[in-house]
Image (cartoon, helix red, strand yellow):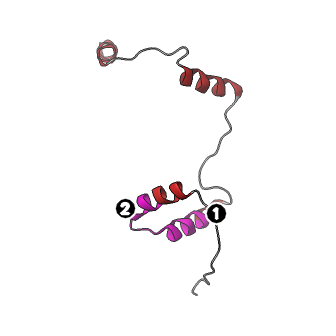
Amino acid sequence: MVAQKIRTNVYLDSDMKEQAKNIFKKYGVSLSDAINMFLTQSVMERGLPFEMKIPNAETIQAIEDARNGINADTVTLENLEKESKQCLQ
């Protein structure tokens, strides 16, 4: 049985569309194929085919702190090497 194909219109961010098309092209998949794959997985999963979470207040604060450089330690290759050697001892 061949699936009936229909045309549909979807409004997309033009830059996002082009970036996605370039990624899909590397896999030999068209944008239309990728959308059909997403829809197929959504039906199979009976929901979105990936996990979506809404961060809690603590996580939101940590993200904001990181963006603003609050409570951020400077990491250097030298410090990482020292710490990794300590872990191996």
Q: Which residues are magenta?
A: 21-40
Q: Residues within 10 Å of mark 1 (few under 14, many from 20)?
A: few
Q: Secondary structure at mark 2?
A: helix
Q: Give the percent coordinates (x, y) of residue 60.
A: 65, 28
Marks 2 and 1 sit apart, C-alpha to C-alpha, by 23 Å
The label on residue 49 is none
Three-letter code for the amino acid on which mark 1 is drawn: Tyr
| Residue 15 shown in magenta | no
Residue shown at 39% from the left, 17% from the top: 75
| Main secondary-structure element of the magenta-colored stretch | helix
Instruction: Name which of mark 2 and mark 1 comes first in the sequence.
Output: 1
Q: Secondary structure at mark 1?
A: loop
Residue shown at 63% from the left, 80% from the top: 6
The label on residue 26 is 2
Which of the 4 quarters of the picture holds residue 56?
A: top right
Residue farthest to the bottom, as pictured: 1
| Residue that carries the numbered disc 1 in the rendered image | 11
Which of the 4 quarters of the picture holds residue 89?
A: top left
Q: Quadrant of the N terminus?
A: bottom right
Q: Give the percent coordinates (x, y) of residue 70.
A: 55, 15
Residue shown at 48% from the left, 58% from the top: 20
